[in-house]
Amino acid sequence: MDNRNNLYQKALEFSKELVIVYRELSKNGIEKELLNQVLRSGTSIGVNIAEAQGSNSENDYLSKIHIAFNEALETRFWIELLFKTGDINSEKYNLLESLLTEIQKILYSMIKGINIKKEKQILKK
């Protein structure tokens, strides 16, 4: 399985877990705006990864991967907030945090690799 497909699958799994958390917390009266925010940023990671796979150019691809990485940073904040307020337990937090860390590592590696490739192309000119 290549890195892109692996990343897509991890993002899909992460989004699935977020939807489950959203459904559970919605029943518990957690602030709707907070839940909407974590769901929006968390699922945006996978959406941007999927869009990157259909990019027409390397610049568009890199842009989508950057957006996915930034959405992951935002989502990490929201998940940590939900944990610190006691809205999600440590087991759920650790699962989400672990999946998110894997996704961020792959995204960072991809960004770094593309940037190195671009630098080499510039140096060749």
Image: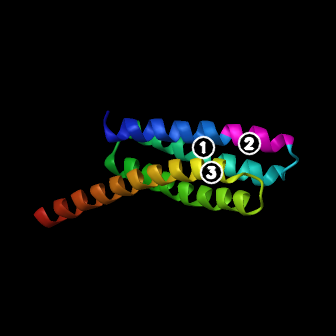
Q: Which amino acid type corresponds to the residue marked 2 in the rendered image?
A: Tyr
Q: Is residue 77 magenta?
A: no
Residue 70 higher or lower than 30, as above or below: below
**What colouring method underlies this structural image?**
rainbow
**Disc number lying in front (2 or 3):** 2
**The N terminus lies in which quarter of the figure?**
top left
Q: What is the secondary structure assignment of the residue under circle 3?
A: helix
* Total marks placed: 3
Furthest toward the front, the residue is 91
Residue that appears at 54% across and 47% down: 45
Reading the chain from its start, which is encountered first: label 2 or label 1?
2
Q: Earlier in the sequence, mark 2 or mark 3?
A: 2
Query: Relative to 19, does residue 101 appear above or below in the rendering?
Result: below
Q: Secondary structure at mark 2?
A: helix
Whether residue 118 is visible to the viewer of this picture, yes or no, is yes
Few, some or many C-alpha atoms within 10 Å of disc 1 (few <14, some 14-19, many ≥20)?
Answer: many
Q: Which residues are magenta?
A: 19-27
Q: Secondary structure at mark 1?
A: helix
The residue where tag 3 is placed is: 41
Looking at the picture, how far across and down is residue 31, in whole percent?
84, 53
- As shown in the figure, which amino acid type bears the numbered disc 1? Thr
Question: Which image quarter is the C terminus in?
Answer: bottom left
Q: Are marks 1 and 3 in contact (CB under 8 Å)?
A: yes
Q: How far is the residue under mark 1 from the one under mark 3?
A: 6 Å
Residue 69: image tag: none
Name the residue that disc number 2 marks. 22
Q: Residue at x 76, y 38 (%)?
A: 23
> What's the CA distance linking mark 2 and mark 3?
12 Å
Q: Residue drawn at (59%, 58%), measured in percent from left and top?
A: 76
Q: Residue at x 24, y 61 (%)?
A: 116
